[in-house]
């Protein structure tokens, strides 16, 4: 899944990147392009300072600059503009800006120059998030080990310990301002709608929990969830568009908005006309990234509404494989262009 980083622009200043450190920086930036995100201010000030500080004359740094430019071209996916400008955008104290973002937005890892590294280490205890490291040590850090683990996504949801499963979902939705869920089966679910309600609520719960960690960042709602699905033939015969919308409104949208009212959740449902049967894969879109949930968003086995006053039965996860397919962004764009019913 997505691992968050905060980079000190001082790393890119003249004399900071020798040939060996240039290789270390290339590995770091390639990892960010694969499954990382850079935290920055609303104007991407830190990234722009990093790019501006990089020497154009040193041949060792040419590939580093190329990678930075690639990240900038893909900034919707690779840069999260989470933090307000410090001092109205006029502050030149990079240490203050880095400390503010690290403290408010809790990236997984901060990579910094020696001076900033020492100051940040005073603020955050060993083992806390964020992990603070210098560039030479990054390749052997826990943050890089975590990034590589999430890059491969080897396990199904039902095989993961609770803590790791929560971490996986958390690293999909952290820093997102809007989520999109695409599942053609939701619109024809009928009495099975409760299973989708529980699965989608689990994702929103992690989204709410992730943003709550950043309350000092003052990132208020509303928070928008867009659900894309189809009507037509389901497991129990034909479901009309009007009946589908009514069921999803009463059994999915309204319960979600009530459950997460303090989070400011707003749910929009779009029913697409999938005449050519293009709509098959079930995916979650967040921060410009797309994650496939192989069997859809009804994560739990044998669940349904339980009698009032009784504790709910223990949840049993279904075998749902999660991946980040390279075709994801194009697939989502095509589905959004389908005509609505």
Image: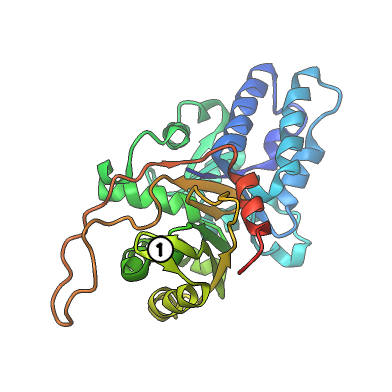
- Residue under the point 58% across and 57% down: 274
Give above or below for 325 relative to 247: above
- Residue under the point 62% across and 36% down: 33
Give above or below for 182 relative to 158: below
Q: Is residue 213 visible?
A: no
Give above or below for 150 relative to 206: above
Q: Residue 302: x and y, percent?
A: 21, 59
Between 22 and 316, the one lying in front of the other is 316
- Could you say which quadrant of the image residue 62 lies in? top right
Left or right of residue 287, residue 212 in this image: left
**Total numbered circles:** 1
Q: Which residue is mark 1?
A: 200
Furthest-left residue in view? 310
- Could you say which quadrant of the image residue 205 lies in? bottom left
Q: Is residue 211 visible?
A: yes
Q: Residue 332: x and y, percent?
A: 61, 51
Q: Secondary structure at mark 1?
A: helix
Using a 10 Å C-alpha cutoff, classify the residue at mark 1 as few (fewer than 14 neighbours), some (14 to 19) or many (20 or more). Answer: many
User: Which quadrant holds the C terminus?
Assistant: bottom right
Between 67 and 165, the one lying in front of the other is 165
- Residue under the point 76% across and 42% down: 73
Left or right of residue 58, residue 226 in this image: left
Give above or below for 324 relative to 337: above
- Residue under the point 51% across and 44% down: 2
Between 247 and 3, the one lying in front of the other is 247
Between 192 and 235, the one lying in front of the other is 235
Q: Residue 253: x and y, percent?
A: 45, 75
């Amino acid at each position: 899944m997505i691992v968050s980083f905060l980079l000190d622009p001082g790393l890119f200043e003249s004399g900071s990147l020798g040939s060996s450190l240039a290789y270390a920086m290339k590995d770091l930036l390639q990892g960010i392009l694969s499954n990382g995100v850079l935290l920055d201010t609303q104007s991407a000030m830190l990234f722009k300072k990093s790019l501006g500080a990089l020497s154009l004359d040193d041949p060792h740094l040419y590939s580093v600059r190329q990678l930075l430019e690639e990240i900038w071209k893909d900034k919707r996916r690779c840069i999260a503009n989470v933090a307000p400008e410090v001092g109205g955008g006029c502050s030149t104290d990079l240490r203050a800006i880095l400390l503010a973002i690290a403290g408010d937005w809790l990236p997984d890892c901060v990579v910094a120059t020696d001076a900033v590294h020492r100051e940040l280490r005073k603020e955050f205890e060993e083992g806390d998030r964020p992990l603070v490291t210098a560039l030479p040590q990054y390749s052997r850090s826990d943050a890089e080990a975590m990034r590589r683990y999430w890059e491969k996504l080897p396990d199904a949801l039902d095989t993961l310990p609770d803590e790791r499963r929560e971490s996986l979902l958390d690293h999909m939705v952290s820093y997102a301002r809007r989520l999109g869920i695409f599942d053609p089966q939701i619109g024809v679910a009928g009495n099975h709608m409760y299973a989708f309600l529980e699965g989608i609520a689990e994702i929103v719960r992690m989204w709410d929990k992730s943003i709550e960690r950043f309350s000092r960042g003052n990132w208020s709602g509303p928070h928008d969830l867009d659900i894309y699905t189809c009507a037509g033939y389901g497991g129990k015969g034909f479901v009309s568009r009007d009946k589908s919308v009514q069921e999803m409104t009463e059994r999915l949208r309204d319960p979600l908005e009530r459950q997460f009212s303090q989070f400011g959740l707003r749910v929009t449902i779009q029913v697409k006309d999938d005449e050519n049967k293009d709509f098959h894969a079930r995916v979650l879109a967040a921060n410009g990234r797309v994650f496939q949930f192989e069997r859809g968003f009804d994560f739990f086995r044998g669940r349904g509404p339980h009698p009032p006053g009784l504790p709910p039965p223990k949840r049993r996860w279904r075998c749902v494989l999660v991946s980040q397919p390279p075709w994801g962004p194009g697939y989502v764009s095509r589905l959004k262009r389908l005509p609505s019913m």
